[in-house]
Amino acid sequence: MEENMKLATVEDTVEYHLFLIPDEPRDPEKHKEILQKYIERIMTHFAPMLVPYIWQNQPFNLKYKPGKGDVPAHMFGMTKFGDNIEDEWFIVYVVKQITKEFPELVARIEDNDGEFLLIEAADFLPKWLDPDNSANRVFFHQGELCIIPAPRKPGAVSWLPSTPPTIPQALNIISTHPEKILASDSIQAAVNRRIRGYPEKIQASLHRAHCFLPAGIVAVLKQRPRLVAAGVQAFYLRDPIDLRACRIFKTFLPETRIMASVTFTKCLYAQLVQQRFVPDRRSGYKMPPPSHPQYRAHELGMKLAHGFEILCSKCSPHFSDSKKSVMTTSPLWAGFLESLKKNDYFKGLIEGSAQYQARLEMAKNYFQLSVNRPESSLALSPGEEILTLLQTTPFDIEELKKEEANLPPEDDDQWLDLSPDQLDQLLQEAAGKKEAEPISKKEEQNYDLTQVSESMKAFISKVSTHKGAELPREPSEAPITFDADSFLNYFDKILGPRPHESDSDDLDDEDFECLDSDDDLDLKTQGTGEEASLKGTLNDLKSYMAQMDQELANTSIGKSFTTQKQMEPLSQTTSNNSDEEDSGAGGSVMTPVDVDLNLVSNILESYSSQAGLAGPASNLLQSMGVQLPDNTDHRPTS
């Protein structure tokens, strides 16, 4: 049965701001004109890379944003990247390259999470930098990541404000002290790791597949390859109301279907493939059996056709014709086209050829969306754009059918089925960690589990702040020490001075003997009443703890722990059974718990229950540099 609930999505967006470094006061109108020229230059320069890119939701774009408050007029863009996080990091790469190509520009970039560049480099940030004081500190300048530092003491550095800087202050600091604000090599490396491989990486993010599609969709995708994203999203986020339009198809009839090659991003392809869907009987989209050699192509085409039909059903077929003429009426188009030719966008193609026309159409669409963006009231929706193309671009079904014989081969989609080991490797690479070397059979046999116990002790003993626990970054880190005085002093500063009365739960007999020693004679003479009160309190505590031990002895709680007595030889254990039974619950001897053994056994049980997948036990141990061998005991667990 088809799911009746629309999938909820978070509108993940990334915002980017490009400022011109101040060199002299400018007239507002003159400044606006300068910034608009920069927008044209930037979008033209990067057109060969941006035009063919398939965006998940919205493309990279820039527009003039007037000054407001402390924020001066600048170039601004916002992109909804949705489920494809690679769109966001591609934009990071583009913004970084813009500041490299135009060194007089400074850029800052953030998303729903705020300063996500700092989040990516969280392991390498200086201690003083946190979300509370990071505003207006992170910028790109001349292709480098910059972090404006904070002075250790107010006024210690004349050119650094004691509070987070304003945008004008930040721009002035960047222009006057560019060499003093560069981020550390480790922070730069963490960010560069995520954008490594661009622009070549763009091709690696695409997936080409055969789809059995209505001829109208094939013709539309020839003109606007990027509309595949809108079609996939419409199907992926469908609801019962959307599917009413697909009971009987009005725009993309199933009898016009032909085989075509469609280029997706890997994210879009995965969204289309992974959803189970059975078309309505009335739609006319009948599926071959799963054993059919072209079943996948039929299934992909059927799903994509539903997405396109949903898009077209959302707009009136008689939408305003004024929207259709927005495309290249701008006076900027002639200059933009000339710039594309100078930047070798057409790759030497003969003007008027089919390939030239295809690239020209892509450039027109790119110009409309990114350079000469119309007001929202005039912007075409994806459905309106599809209907416009169907009305204005004639196509011959017979010609399209002839192309079926010469389709390029499909890409292998084995990347959809990653093994747990491959997934772990990808996660480690994304985190910047080297792949752990596999443990040999000999090492498995001689594996010392005391390493697990010692690592956990070091982790628990490590002093952390209110911000959370800190794990050792390298397994070779020096042993962690616990400074009790520093620990107590830290809490004294937060909670105030401690009362003089003792509040310890674990005082033993030696602590009591110490109170009666000769060294405490002066103390006794000074306050006999206080001593008696303290002694009485401690005696009450001992009595209270003994009573708790006796009550717990009557329960089964102790049986859940492995005690030292359980590790004694069997003969010794059995010889004492009769004595214990005779002594009864009231006289039972509480045997100490083997803490190390319980710790290791519980971690191993948790690790085994993960069944080779990522989980809390393996994640915690790996972060401390401990790698457990694979579980070879395949007995079922309870």
Image (tube, rainbow, N blue to C red):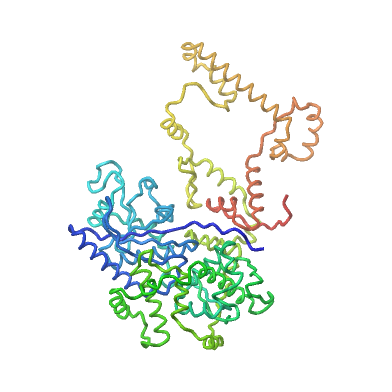
Q: Is residue 78 left or right of residue 524?
A: left
Image height of 538 relative to 150, above or below: above
Which quadrant of the figure has residue 410?
A: bottom right
Quick one: 271 or 473, which is closer to the camera? 271
Residue 201, can we see it?
no
- Judged from this view, the residue extending furthest toward the front is 318
Percent of width and height locating residue 254? 60, 78
Q: Residue at x 45, y 62 (%)?
A: 81
Image height of 300 relative to 8, above or below: below
Residue 182, can we see it?
yes
Percent of width and height locating residue 197? 43, 69
Quick one: 314 or 137, which is closer to the camera? 314
Quick one: 357 or 118, which is closer to the camera? 357
Q: Residue at x 53, y 79 (%)?
A: 261
Image height of 509 relative to 267, above or below: above
Percent of width and height locating residue 46? 34, 72
